[in-house]
Image (spheres, helix red, strand yellow):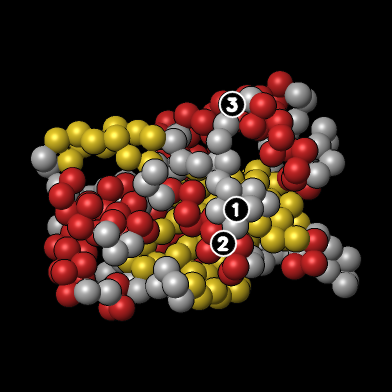
Amino acid sequence: MTSLVELLDRLWQDYATLNPQAKAIHQLLEARGETVTNDHIALRTFRDPIVGVDVVASAFEKLGYVARGEYVFPDKKLFARHYEHADAAQPKLFISELKVEEFSPRLRQTVRRLIDQIPPDLLRRADFPASGRPWKISYAEYELLRSESEYAAWMSAFGFRANHFTVLVNALKTFKTLQELNEFLKKSGFKLNSSGGEIKGSPQVLLEQSSTLADQVIVDFTDGPRTIPCCYYEFARRYPQEDGTLFQGFVERSADKIFESTNKR
């Protein structure tokens, strides 16, 4: 049985190895005397009985996570749910799935071929959400998927792992605003996702978010290695609700633009 600490650590180690900018930002913040608190971890999947949101979430639910809000993204044809742990010190989870049934037969057939390659025993493993890419895929297939959905292409190339981790800006001591943090990151050489503005959301919707653009990494495809966008680092500032507690949910309009951090450029 994998413990929660082990599963979250595996997700972080895999993500940070794949996404060097996360380690670099982490180190920059710690050099300022900050202790980095993780607000949430995002995972992606395909809508399918074998690997859908419920399947990915089940490993976490066995470790104490409970489903909370649900979100729909019509333009990107996505559904998502967020999960919280009884121990508020644990990061929230934001698990999304591509509504495969709303795409062309060509995309549906390609995704079916990928899912059919997953070893059945892998699905039963407690660390399935951190197992990586369990299928072979060509760059031509990746591009075919990308022509309809950047999200589908990302999933096909990277599989089951953290898409991003998120710094809780409220817990930082040397930055008063998300804007200040963004300026620091840009001066440090990091490029931010400007789709919908560098800061998505507002105090009025109780959540502000920004993110880096995904690192470019070399991925092995069956027809040769290619350089494509991988993972990114997000930053979230939460605001108090009427009862004084911080808002813990997500804002669809903002998350819609955050998804674009992994788009191919």
The x and y percentages for residue 256 are: 53, 63
x 29%, y 35%: residue: 227
Circle 3 residue: 189
Lower position in the chain sequence, tag 2 or tag 3? 3
The amino acid on which the numbered mark 3 sits, given as a three-letter code, is Gly
In 3D space, how far apart are the residues under numbered discs 1 and 3 (Cα atoms)?
24 Å
User: Counting other residues with Cα less than 10 Å from the Cα at mark 1, is it few (<14), some (14-19), or many (20 or more)?
Assistant: many
In 3D space, how far apart are the residues under numbered discs 1 and 2 (Cα atoms)?
13 Å
x 70%, y 47%: residue: 168
Closer to us: 219 or 135? 219
Please indicate whether residue 222 sits to the left or right of residue 77 in the image. Answer: left
> Looking at the image, how many numbered discs can be counted on the residues?
3
The x and y percentages for residue 90 are: 64, 52
| Element at label 1 | strand
Q: Nearer the viewer, mark 1 or mark 3?
A: 3
The x and y percentages for residue 166 are: 60, 47
Residue 40 image label: 1
Residue furthest to the top? 31
Choose top left, top right, bottom left or bottom right for residue 125. Answer: bottom left
